[in-house]
Each structure stands twice: as structure tokens, then as C-alpha cells.
Amino acid sequence: MNTLEQNNVEMVKQFIDSFWNESEFDAVDQFLSEDYQELSYQSKEGLQKFAATILDAFPDKRYTVEEIIGQGEKVLVRMTVKGTHEGMFFGTAATGHMIDVTLYRQYRVVDGKIAEHRGWIDMVTMWSQIRGKIDR
């Protein structure tokens, strides 16, 4: 029998794969609670809009979970995103440069659904890679 933490970790992994890797943006209905709080992108719609922006700019993007920890309702994730800058990204035209950036995510899972999310990304490294100033 799985513990609460194991179930929460597995559900967050499934969300990351469906939403971020498979670009199933309607997966928010399956994985996010009705009263979901988005602390990085303002709302469910903001999350979907940002994910679409990433897909347009980095169509070959791939998120890889490097480390994931569940403790009670909280699930902490360290992951990387890799991709090629092939489309417009916040006013910057495609450069063809690769990104390989670390992200940190904190989810709160209640009754089998993600109720809250906040995230952090190394934007300095990301923009440096987009501009071709550093490799990873």
C-alpha cells in the first residue's frame, strides 16, 4: 500500500509528464483542484498560457525530474528543462541555441489534486544560453 507521500509524488510526476512534456494543457482539469492557487503564473489560465509560450519557443523541450521529495501535503521537485530556442520567447526571436536549465517546484497536494504551486527557475542561465553566451 502506498503512503500519502508516495501517492502525491506519483501524481505530481504524472502531471509534469502530461502537462509539461506531452503539452496536454487541458490536463489542468484532471490534476488541479477547483480552488487551485498558482503562485508563479497568477492562475490556471496563466499557467496554461506560459506553457504554450514555452512550447512555441522550444518545441522540442523536455522536462526531466532529477529529484522529488514528498512530505505530507508538500512535494518538492528539482528538474531540468532542455530544448532548442526555435520560436519567439518574450520578444526574443529564435536563436537556435540550446537551453539546459534547472527549475525548482513546490506543489501542495490535497485529496489527490494539486492545490498550490510555486516555482523558481535559473533565468540568468536560461537567458545566457538563449543568447549563446554560455553552454551547459
Image (tube, grey):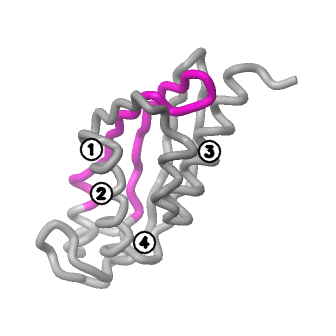
Residue placed under numbered mark 3 in the picture: 13
Q: In the rendered structure, which disc, 3 or 2, sits on the residue that comes first in sequence?
A: 3
Mark 1 Cα shell of 10 Å, populated few (<14), some (14-19), many (≥20) = some
* Amino acid type of the residue tagged 1 in the rendering: Tyr
Inter-mark Cα distance, 1 to 4: 21 Å
Q: Magenta part of the protein: which range?
A: 100-126
Mark 3 Cα shell of 10 Å, populated few (<14), some (14-19), many (≥20) = some
Residue at left offset 17%, top offset 81%: 93
Q: Is residue 103 left or right of residue 128?
A: right
Labels 2 & 1 near each other (Cβ < 8 A):
yes
Inter-mark Cα distance, 4 to 3: 19 Å
Q: In the rendered structure, which disc, 1 or 3, sits on the residue that comes first in sequence?
A: 3
Residue placed under numbered mark 1 in the picture: 41
Q: In the rendered structure, which disc, 2 or 4, sits on the residue that comes first in sequence?
A: 2
Q: Secondary structure at mark 2?
A: helix
Residue placed under numbered mark 2 in the picture: 50
Q: Is residue 102 left or right of residue 32?
A: left
